[in-house]
Each structure stands twice: as structure tokens, then as C-alpha cells.
Amino acid sequence: MAKEITIGNGILVTLGKENLVIPRGAVLIRDGVIAAVGTDAEVRKQAPEAEYVDAAGKVIMPGLINAHHHLYSTFARGMAPKDPPPYTFVEVLERLWWPLDAALVEGDLYYAAMLPLIDCIKQGTTSIIDHHESQGYQIGSLSELAKAVDDSGIRGCLCLGISDRYGRGAEGIEENVRFVKEANSVPATAARRVCGMFGLHAAFTVEDETLAAAVSAADRLGVGFHTHVAEAASDEEASLVRYGQRVLRRLRDKGALGEKSLAIHCVHIDGEETDILLETGTAAVHNPESNMNNAVGVAPVLEMFGRGIAVGLGTDGMTSDMRSGVKTAFFLQHLAQEDPRVGFCESCSLLLDNNPEIVSRQFGYRVGVLAPGAAGDVIVVDYTAPTPLDGNTWLGHFLFGICCGAAVDTTVVGGKVLMRGKKLTLLDEEALAARCRERARAFYGRF
């Protein structure tokens, strides 16, 4: 008999092109896939024996998506800064992130990943695209991360950032090839929660010979690239000095762009590079909190939107809370443009419209919408609307209500309940956190 679960008796928001808002609505998930949406009475008639989750008037909506995460960065939290602290973005890379990823060893990654994955569940983030870095531990690293993602119950598209900064570019290609073959051999249905693509670290750290070999391998496997692009002005400067081209022109000419590729940050791209994103169908991913933290600038999000580029939203590993990222993106555009009228719809669309499109390209099935045939990923948010909530008012309630402290009550991925009543159902957070702290202490000794 098919496994069925109905989540009902709440304000159901489907998202997607129609974005239906159904008072006292419900969604039926059968074998991990959405089978029906509608009123609670209609849906329950279709599967009267299904397990029932009573939303008790709360908001029922699709699980959220993070289009750029760094699970490995967990051990940086609480790390004492070196004296003097890094000032430029290059110093941040050279004195924090590159030594950190070089010091990671086998066994670290599982626990470093489990804690942000738990936070994903608690924050209603049900799918992530992760960009991994561990130059000292490459072969096998993606399988360790995949085990963490699988154990957590959420969805993850994984890659390793290929780089020549320690002379290990060929090994990075080998790990991406190995993992993509392993993960993507499973049929692209909602039952497959882990998949792979190719990663490139900041493109200026990847030499032409390595880049050509990576493109050739990715093409054979039918996957795209997940690449940091023009995060700081120094990225463009380094690309021009070393390779004679700006970042996106070089990536295009080498064949690393396309509809399955992601250009992360894009803070310092120019008009020609914006054209390149559009021409190649490459998605861009905005990371406003990280960009502000590193003081690298403000990405031209509104310009890219205006050109029809799919611009998604990520956190760059700073958090797993996508609602925080939406608020930051919104306020940042107000400040950068010095105009309180701009960015409202665009900031919400980063997460609610474009991230589902971007992640669906990677997984090969629909994610991020409550519609028959889509993956059965649903969250229930403890939000009580103080004014009418319907299709016309939804975005206002989302940005200024749901994104402003409303707790996620229930998280369901592929029909499996990962959190209910704000309590994890499958994982022991305290035990995992204790083990993570033990690994972190040993890591600090190496760092």
C-alpha cells in the first residue's frame, strides 16, 4: 500500500505561477510526491486512511531552498580572530577560509554538516545546493557530506570546489567525477534526495589546463558548475592579470557556463558579463548577508532581474535561515539604491520563485511548489495573520510576518516528518552537537 500523509487544516499557500492561497487547505503526499492540493475536506476524501498532520490554522507552504550553502564552514563559528584581523577580502581567504579547509580531515565533515542541516530542518529549509571546500581531504569528502545529508532527511546537491591553490586541481576533478557518477546514477525522481554537480573555487584559483579538464569531464557527465564569481573586485583584477579576461568571459569561453551552472555572488560583474549570464542561461545566486559581512559590495540584483536572469538566494554558509536572507536582500536594495520603493517583489522572488527553478534544474524534478507531481516537501509555519491573507496580500505577510520571527512548527521532506511541534523526530541534536564540539577542538589544534 502507498505511504500517504495529509497536512491540512491550515492556510495553504502553493507558490508557483498560480500561487493559490486556500483557507483551511490541505496537501496530500503519496510515496514522497504531492498527489493533491485543495480544501481540507476535498483532500481528506481522497485518502481517508492517510496519516494526518493538523496544522491547526497555521500556514502550510512549500519547504524553502538554499541555493548556495557551505556546510563545511561550521568550525569557523566562535573561532578567535588572528591579530591583526584580516582587512581585505583576499586576507579573509588567505588567513581564515583557505587554512580552515586545508585543516579538515576525514570524520570532521559529517559532524560539521549535521549541525547546519539540523538548523535547515528547524528553519524550514528542505533543499540546499552546497559548495564544499577541503583541500587537505578531497577524495571521499563528498560521500561523507552525502551521508550527513541523507541522515538529516533533507535534499542536497553537492560539489567540491576544484582549485589549484595547493596544486591539487586534478584530485578535485577526480572527486567530482567519482561522486557525480555515484550520486547521479540513481534515477532523477523525488526519491533521490542527493545529487552532484561540479564545483570550482573562485575562478582565479583554477588554471586554464585544470579548467579545460574539468569542463571536459562535466560535459561527459551532463552536469554544470557551481562557481564563485566576482565576489570581490580583487577577483576580477586577478582574472585580468592572470588570464587576460574578466571572470565570466573566461568561464564562457572555456565552456563552464549554461543552464545547469550557477554563478555565485556576481557582485562586481559589468554589463558585458550580465549579457553573458543571459546568453548562456546561467543562474546567478545572491548572498546578501555574506557580502555585507565581507564588505565586498552590493550585487546588481535589480539589473539582473530586469534582464530576465534567474537570480536565486543563498547564505554562503552564514546561516540556514533563508527568511533572514530575504529580509537582508530587501533592506540592502533600499539602502544601496537610496529608494524605499524598490526590491520588494524581487527580494521575495529570489527565494520563492527562482530558487525552486534553480534547484529543480539540478535535481531533475519539481521542488518548491505544492502541486501534483512535485516533491512532497512541506513546512508548517506558526504564523497568525493580523489582517486578511490572500493571493493579493501574501507577499506582505511573508516578508513582514513570516520572515520576522515566525517559528517553523513542522518540516516534511518527501512525505517524511523531520520535525513536528518544533521537535526533531529523527535526530538527537544534543548528542550530535557534543560530538561536533569534540571534533572542533581537535580541528583548532591543527588550524
Image: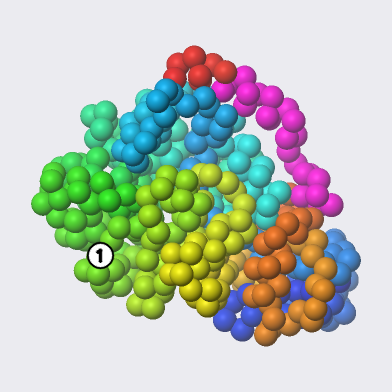
Q: Residue at x 61, y 37 (%)?
A: 114
Q: Does residue 314 show up magenta in the picture?
A: no
- Three-letter code, disc 1: Asp
Work out whether 51 lies above or below 153.
below
Q: Give the quarter of the image for residue 404.
A: bottom right
Q: Which residues are magenta?
A: 419-440
Residue under numbered circle 1:
270
Can you tell which quarter of the image residue 248 is in? Answer: bottom left
x, y percent for residue 238:
20, 45
Question: Camera-side residue: 72 or 341?
Answer: 341
**Residue 278 x, y percent position in the rendering:** 30, 72
Q: How many marks?
A: 1
Which residue does the image show at 53% across and 27% down from the upper left? 79
Q: Is residue 281 above or below residue 17?
A: above
* Res 367 seen here: no
Look at the image and tell me in which quarter the C terminus lies: top left
Query: Would residue 19 be visible to someone looking at this image?
Result: yes
Q: Secondary structure at mark 1?
A: loop
Q: Quadrant of residue 119?
A: top right
Q: Position of residue 206 (x, y in %)?
A: 23, 42
Q: Nearer the viewer, residue 61 or 295?
A: 295
At x 50%, y 36%, the residue is 73
